[in-house]
Image (cartoon, helix red, strand yellow):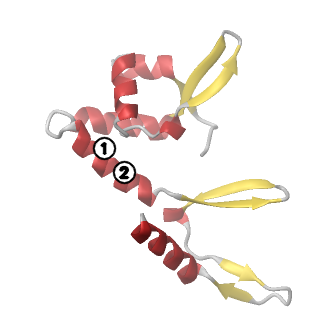
Amino acid sequence: MNQDHLISKKDLLVRYGISYGALYRWKRKGLIPDEWFIKKSTTTGQETFFPEKLVCERIEMIQKMKEDVLLDELAKQFSGEERRNEAILLNTEFGEKSFRWCDVKEIFLMRKNGERVDITAAVKELLEEKERQE
């Protein structure tokens, strides 16, 4: 998750005029993913930050839709969206790098001789099988 553009919890609550209680109720219901709550040390102690673009878009959607749709229904819709935003995580000697699954076009295995073997379909099949098991 890109942490370059974060917004503090305080600034988020002020910007959207929402209460601390509402924010954490939305978290409990799954409307705002737990991984978006980023704890960081600051000069005043520990504060919570969020990926600004993601959380602002989500809060705007919640505020727009909550009058017409129950929060539990919104949570179901958002969980489907989260599935589309699942990520591929590559763990190497040089660290970890993640890519949102919906952004991945092709996955290749590079052989020693330079041959590229397309493994995209195999990875998709594994993911679909895993979903069926859940």
Q: Amino acid at mark 1?
A: Ala
Q: Position of residue 39 (x, y in %)?
A: 61, 27
- The residue lying at 38 percent from left, 25 percent from top is 23
Q: CA distance from mark 1 to mark 2?
A: 6 Å
Picture quadrant where residue 119 is located: bottom right
Crowd tier of the residue under label 1, counting other residues whose Cα lies within 10 Å: few below 14, some 14–19, many 20 or above: some
Outermost residue, left direction? 68
| Vertical position of residue 29 compared to residue 119: above or below | above
Outermost residue, front direction? 133
Q: Amino acid at mark 2?
A: Ser
Outermost residue, top direction? 44
Q: Are marks 1 and 2 in contact (CB under 8 Å)?
A: yes
The tag on residue 132 is: none
**Mark 2 sits on what residue?**
79
| Vertical position of residue 81 compared to residue 131: above or below | above
Left or right: residue 40 compared with residue 68: right
Left or right: residue 40 compared with residue 100: right
Picture quadrant where residue 6 is located: top right
Q: Position of residue 74 (x, y in %)?
A: 26, 43
- Circle 2: element type: helix
**Mark 1 sits on what residue?**
75
- The residue lying at 44 percent from left, 36 percent from top is 55
Left or right: residue 43 compared with residue 87: right
